[in-house]
Image (cartoon, helix red, strand yellow):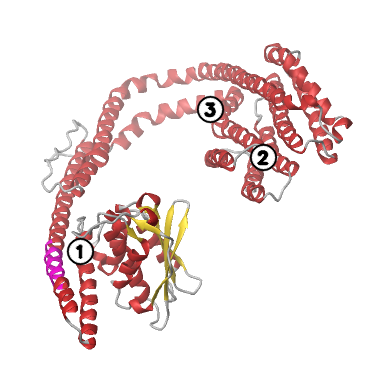
Amino acid sequence: MAKRGRPIALKLLVLLFVPLVSLVGLWAFAAGLTGGDGLRLLEINNLVSNLADPSEQVNIQLQRERLASVELLAGKETSAQLARQRETTTRVVDRFKALSKAQRDVSPEMTTQLAAVYRDLDRLGELRGKIDKASVGALEVINGYSVMVDSVFRMYDKMILVPDMSLYRQARAVTMLGEAKEILSRERAMIVAVLAVGEVGGNERTAFTQMVATRRLLFSQALSHLDTGLRRPYEQLASSPVYTEFLHLEDAVRGPATATGLPASAATWPIDAENLWVAVERNQFEAVQGMVKRVTPAAVNTLVKIGVAGGIGLIAVVMSIALSFRFRRRLARELAALRAAATELSDVRLAGLVERLRKGSREPERIEPLDVPAMTSEVRDIVQAFNIVQSTAVEAAVGQARLRHGVNQVFVNLARRNQSLLHRQLLQLDAMERGSEDPETLEDLFKLDHLTTRMRRHAESLIILSDQTPGRGWRSPVPMIDVLRAAVAEVEEYARVEVLQPPRMALAGHAVTDVVHLVAELVENATLFSPPPTRVDLRSTVTPHGLTVEVEDRGFGIARADLDAFNERLASMPEFDLAESDRLGLFVVGRLAARHDIRVMLSPSPFGGLTAAVMLPAALLTDQLALTTGGR
């Protein structure tokens, strides 16, 4: 047997230990002298990506939602428009939380402020609830959103880490301009509120006066700290007619004359505010981009100094690098090829094989073994091991597919035979019932007919589990009352089931058989897992998305963990598992629901048992009054 070579890790350690230690020592010495400022400047990139940019989007969406909420209270916005804005805000807030929690090396002060931001953002749902109930005034809505935005700005105060004093002043001034922009957003919302009532109340005037004073102070202070390049767009804005018109607007709103009514020019206030808002947004974006462009060259310049200082250390290890480069390159090439081959095996080859087998392919094409050229013994061993794993996995997957296909065929053959015999038996029983007049005989025949109907449903369950469709069907819609009664008729203890009068709606003919089967399975479970004297209720309710049929029992219920597991399985079409044959009904319900885009959900019942909700989509329903005569 050939002697195995030394491990790769040991070879690299022996070759690179001394030069790397020397390089790290020299690099650490140089970085300790000049690298602190540069590294802190580069950290801004991560803070901008994970905190500043996402939180800025949070502020933007909160400002829009605040304006939309006030417009809703003022009757200028629909609830649907506000709902769409809320969805956008929620998505942006969730993204900010995810990125900020993933940010590492956060200072204790920043951690404390982030906790405050999370706490304020968590109150968003409570504020939305008050707005929906119209139990809050416009001023309280504005203040509620303002608390969240202010918390984000306090976080910005902790993010200014640049050691250069001039950059610090510029960054602080840009942040102050952002706060002034936020005050402008509050003023826009307040203008909408006062226009809705036709006058400016005392509380609104006080709040608006404070907003005006704060905005003007922040704007003037920020301009005094900006240099010429960043200040020029704002100076142009301050001397523009757009800004002048808005100043007149602010003075008019906070003036005493608006206490009893608004002037005729109030009709243009929203337009004046919108014009200034667009200009401020453009200037703010340009100012932020200008700061980013200034920070990056400073950081690069510092890192260049570090690289020059560390170059002396590179000279000490250049010989070691020259000797080890050949081995490193070959090893990297082999490992990269191995990684690509292993990724292809797991993500493409085996995944595609399993998918094809699930779709019915019984004899898949041959999967070629991994071909990774390698000179290192460890890599060759890994390639061989992967090939063995691939062969074993393919054999197991093919065997499972054949077994599953065989079981499905057995189910279908048995079910089809039983279904044919049961159909003939039902026809015979129907003929006997029509020809008999003896009450006792008729009662026995009805019981036998009911029993045969249940047997037919169980036979159809096997067909459904095999991804086949039962032969029964309707061409025309069927009233829901008939559908529910047919489902109850297929249950042994049908006398315990009380069917409440459903809405006058009908079910599409192609879905009748499956819906009857689905409801019958749920009703049967309700009767089996509840005491015999108790009642099972079957009621229906119209919803915005269709019709909900509820099956409620008075049993003992199940554990919460099992309930969640059942709901998760019902949410998607489950694949039948022979190891869980005691849950056949659950598999059948899941298959039928997925076939017609029906949602089934289990929940605890107020009576101690379970409530199974079957949510039928509107596409399966029609108005019962519009029914025409159909056939079965």
Residue 322 is tagged as none
Name the residue carrying label 1.
Answer: 462
| Residue 251 is at least partly visible in this image | yes
In-front residue for pair 67/577: 67
Q: Quadrant of the N terminus?
A: top left
Question: Which span is picked out in magenta?
Answer: 413-425
The residue to which callout 2 is attached is 75
Give the residue type that dot 3 points to: Ala
Q: In the figure, is residue 269 to the left or right of 513?
A: right
* Sequence-wise first label, 1 or 3: 3
Along the viewing direction, whichever of 194 and 555 lies nearer the viewer: 194
- Label 2 Cα neighbours within 10 Å, binned few <14 / some 14-19 / many ≥20: few
| Residue indicated by mark 3 | 28
Instruction: Note whether residue 558 is visible.
Output: no
Q: Nearer the viewer, residue 631 or 481?
A: 631
Please tell me how many numbered marks the rendered image carries: 3
Asked if marks 2 and 1 touch (Cβ < 8 Å), the reply is no
* Residue type highlighted by circle 2: Gly
Between tags 2 and 1, which lies in front?
2
Residue 31 position (above or below residue 2): above
Q: Residues within 10 Å of mark 3 (few under 14, many from 20)?
A: some
121 left or right, relative to 218 = left
**Pointer 2 or 1: first along the chain:** 2
